[in-house]
Image (spheres, rainbow, N blue to C red):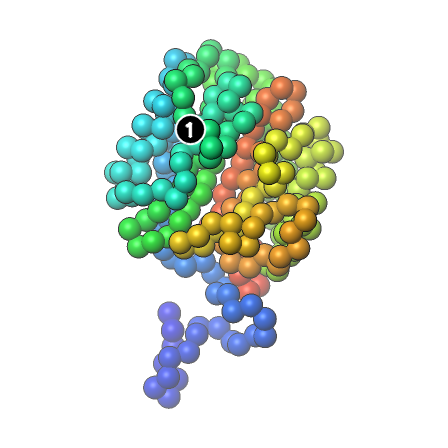
């Protein structure tokens, strides 16, 4: 909260030259991301044998509606089977159904009533899908390792290089159509500071969606959360 000093309103942190970014993410963004995670998990719960991508979309939509969300900033992406290898906002959910050994990829993008945008991807492994489960476990471990030492202001291309090198060393191939592992995000806009890719030297401050999407042993997997690159720390939202 702002502090009063001689009748003046001042920020709750000491001035530091450089990007004027808050140490911690806005509470509205934290709440928005919690909604996104809950909706993505609702999609995972709906990912059972015989469920279609549209069935999963409906489960996500019901979860969003129950949390007071009426808008999304891009479509809910749902990919099962072969579609999990090409899951992208230009490819809407279809009537493709989950088989007995499969994976569902669910990427949700809510806008809250107070205008915050969020972004979260979760994968549900169906049946005895060893390649998908191993891939998801290992990609998640890489993700946590890299993001645990990420620092505010890191050039986007540097974070990309670190994450991609780790993935390649573990046998993963990047699948993203635009060859990136994420993008900037703010209230009212996505991609304003472009993507986390090999060519973007933009320093990372504020909110970024970090979302490596890769394949190994024929299985496509993806991990995504929001991170706040604040004044001193990189915080998982």
Q: Nearer the viewer, residue 234 or 98?
A: 98
Residue 172 image offset from top left, x and y in percent: 67, 29
Residue ID for mark 1: 92
In the rendered image, which quarter contains the N terminus? bottom left
Residue at the front extreme, as displayed: 90
Tell me what residue is drawn at x 67 percent, y 30 percent.
Answer: 173
Query: Number of marks in the image?
Result: 1
Q: Residues within 10 Å of mark 1 (few under 14, many from 20)?
A: some
Residue 32 image offset from top left, x and y in percent: 37, 48
Using residue 191 as the reference point, say whether residue 34 is left or right of it. left
Residue at the bottom extreme, as displayed: 6
Tell me what residue is drawn at x 53 percent, y 61 percent.
Answer: 230
Tell me what residue is drawn at x 71 percent, y 33 percent.
Answer: 168
Using residue 118 as the reference point, say whether residue 15 is left or right of it. right
- Does residue 125 appear anywhere in the picture? no
Residue 51 versus residue 141 in the image, above or below: above
């Amino acid at each position: 909260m702002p502090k009063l000093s001689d009748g003046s309103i001042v920020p709750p942190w000491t001035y530091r030259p450089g990007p004027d970014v808050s140490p911690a993410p806005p509470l509205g963004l934290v709440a928005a991301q919690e909604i996104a995670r809950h909706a993505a998990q609702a999609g995972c719960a709906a990912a059972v044998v015989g469920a279609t991508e549209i069935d999963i979309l409906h489960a996500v939509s019901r979860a969003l509606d129950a949390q007071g969300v009426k808008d999304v900033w891009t479509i809910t992406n749902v990919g099962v089977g072969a579609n999990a290898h090409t899951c992208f906002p230009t490819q809407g959910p279809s009537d493709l159904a989950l088989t007995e050994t499969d994976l569902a990829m669910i990427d949700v993008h809510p806008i809250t009533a107070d205008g915050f945008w969020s972004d979260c991807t979760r994968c549900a492994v169906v049946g005895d899908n060893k390649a998908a489960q191993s891939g998801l476990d290992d990609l998640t471990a890489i993700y946590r390792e890299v993001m645990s030492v990420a620092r505010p202001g890191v050039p986007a291309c540097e974070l990309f290089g670190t994450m991609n090198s780790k993935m390649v060393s573990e046998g993963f191939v990047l699948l993203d159509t635009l060859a990136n592992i994420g993008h900037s995000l703010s209230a009212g806009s996505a991609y304003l500071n472009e993507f986390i890719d090999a060519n973007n030297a933009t320093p990372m401050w504020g909110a970024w969606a970090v979302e490596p999407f890769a394949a190994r042993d024929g299985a496509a997997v993806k991990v995504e959360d929001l991170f706040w690159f604040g004044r001193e720390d990189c915080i998982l939202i």
